[in-house]
Image: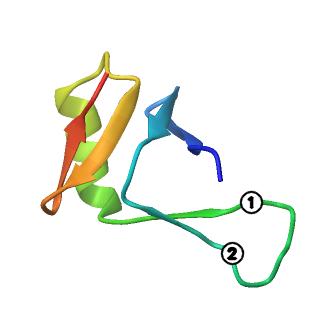
């Protein structure tokens, strides 16, 4: 699976980790993503408004690029 892009605060960002494929077991082609600790991701995005990628490390979202 390629890295998912989501819209966060009006911008597309890439999730490097911290997500699960919603339809992995069903084989459905339309892809959905379940994000871990979405509230913490929103806080990290607010702290790093220029970031284009985020990773979930040790229970925290970190701006990666």
Q: Secondary structure at mark 1?
A: loop
Q: Nearer the viewer, mark 2 or mark 1?
A: 2
The quarter of the displayed image where residue 39 is located? bottom left
How far across and how far down the image is residue 54, in percent?
33, 38
Proximity of marks 2 and 1: CB atoms separated by less than 8 Å: no
Most foreground residue, 6 or 20: 20
Q: Give the label on residue 31, or none.
A: 1
* Quadrant in the picture for the C terminus: top left
Q: Which type of secondary structure does the marked residue at label 2 adopt?
A: loop
Q: Residue at x 20, y 40 (%)?
A: 62
| Residue 30 in which image quadrant | bottom right
Describe residue 44's horizontal placement relative to residue 15 as left or right: left
Circle 1 packing at 10 Å, graded few (<14), some (14-19), many (20+), is few
**Residue 1 in the image, given as x and y percentages of width and height:** 65, 53
Q: Is residue 45 above or below residue 19?
A: above
Question: As drawn, is 61 to the left or to the right of 5?
Answer: left
Residue count near mark 2 (Cα–Cα under 10 Å), binned few <14, some 14–19, many ≥20? few
Q: Residue at x 35, y 59 (%)?
A: 38
Q: Is residue 32 left or right of residue 38?
A: right
Mark drawn on residue 24: 2
As drawn, the residue found furthest toward the top would be 50
In the displayed image of the protein, which residue is found farthest to the bottom? 25
Above or below, 27 against 13 in this view is below
Q: CA distance from mark 2 to mark 1?
A: 8 Å
* Residue at 74% over, 60% down: 31
Q: Where in the figure is residue 43, as x and y percent of width and height?
A: 21, 44
Tag 1 or tag 2, which sits nearer the N-term? 2
């Amino acid at each position: 699976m390629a890295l998912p892009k989501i819209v966060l605060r009006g911008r597309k960002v890439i999730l490097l980790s911290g997500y699960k494929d919603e339809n992995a077991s069903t084989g459905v082609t339309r892809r959905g993503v379940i994000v871990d600790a979405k509230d913490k991701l929103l806080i990290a995005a607010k702290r790093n408004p220029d970031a284009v990628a985020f990773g979930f490390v040790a229970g925290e979202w970190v701006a990666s690029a």
